[in-house]
Image (cartoon, rainbow, N blue to C red):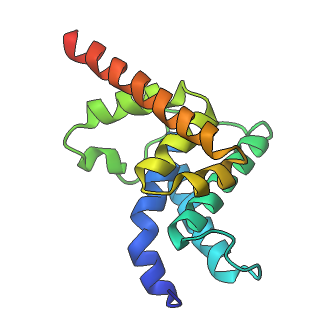
């Protein structure tokens, strides 16, 4: 896929969703998406992943980790500041469920969360393992265990 517009059109939603669930913040997710495509389209290194989607999601994850390192040096904005436009979550009919899911995922380790989200986006286990620098077996175990925790979490929410 050589056309940058086609690449963006095809994968921007996947990269945004992945970034949103990693960071839990729509504005930060949008920044990660923009920077992901900027780096992917201007990078001099060849694509190191078997698929463009896996490559883009790996860049997005690396940007998220980079933002965690820099977060300590930045002051948080006051929550009272008005948002000039409504966040994307307002357009989702099940906003409460989405927020609860994001909260649940934020409580999981970053590696487990990334493994599950990569797999949910259809990335192969070998690409997940390479991206997270773990074995294929470890990637499968992390995805399986977090799926079990997610099923238990859903069952508990439904019974309450």
Residue 160 at x, y percent in the picture: 22, 9
Q: Residue furthest bottom?
A: 3
Residue 108: quarter of image: top right
Residue 29 at x, y percent in the picture: 52, 53
16 over 70 or under it: above or below: below
Give the residue displayed 62% in from the left and 66% down from the top. 35
Give the residue displayed 54% in from the left and 39% down from the top. 140
Give the residue displayed 43% in from the left and 47% down from the top. 83
Task: Decide if residue 123 is in sight here.
Answer: yes
46 over 55 or under it: above or below: below
102 over 17 or under it: above or below: above
Depth check, front residue: 81 or 72:
72
Depth check, front residue: 121 or 67:
121
Residue 14: quarter of image: bottom left
Q: Residue furthest top?
A: 160
Residue 93 at x, y percent in the picture: 19, 42
Depth check, front residue: 113 or 16:
113
Task: Decide if residue 20 is in sight here.
Answer: no
Q: Residue furthest front?
A: 137
Q: Does 61 sit left or right of 44 as displayed?
A: left
136 over 46 or under it: above or below: above
Residue 119 at x, y percent in the picture: 47, 49
Q: Does 30 sit left or right of 96 as displayed?
A: right
């Amino acid at each position: 896929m050589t056309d940058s517009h086609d690449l963006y059109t095809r994968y921007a939603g996947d990269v945004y969703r992945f970034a949103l669930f990693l960071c839990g913040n729509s504005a930060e997710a949008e920044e990660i998406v923009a920077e992901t495509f900027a780096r992917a389209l201007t990078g001099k290194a060849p694509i190191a992943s078997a698929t463009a989607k896996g490559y883009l999601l790996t860049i997005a994850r690396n940007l998220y980790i980079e933002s965690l390192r820099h977060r300590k040096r930045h002051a948080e904005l006051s929550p009272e500041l008005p948002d000039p436009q409504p966040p994307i979550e307002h357009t989702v009919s099940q906003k409460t469920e989405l927020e609860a899911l994001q909260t649940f995922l934020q409580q999981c380790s970053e590696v487990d969360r990334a493994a599950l989200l990569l797999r949910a986006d259809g990335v192969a286990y070998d690409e997940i393992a390479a991206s997270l620098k773990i074995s294929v077996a470890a990637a499968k175990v992390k995805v399986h265990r977090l799926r079990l925790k997610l099923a238990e979490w859903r069952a508990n929410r439904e019974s309450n």
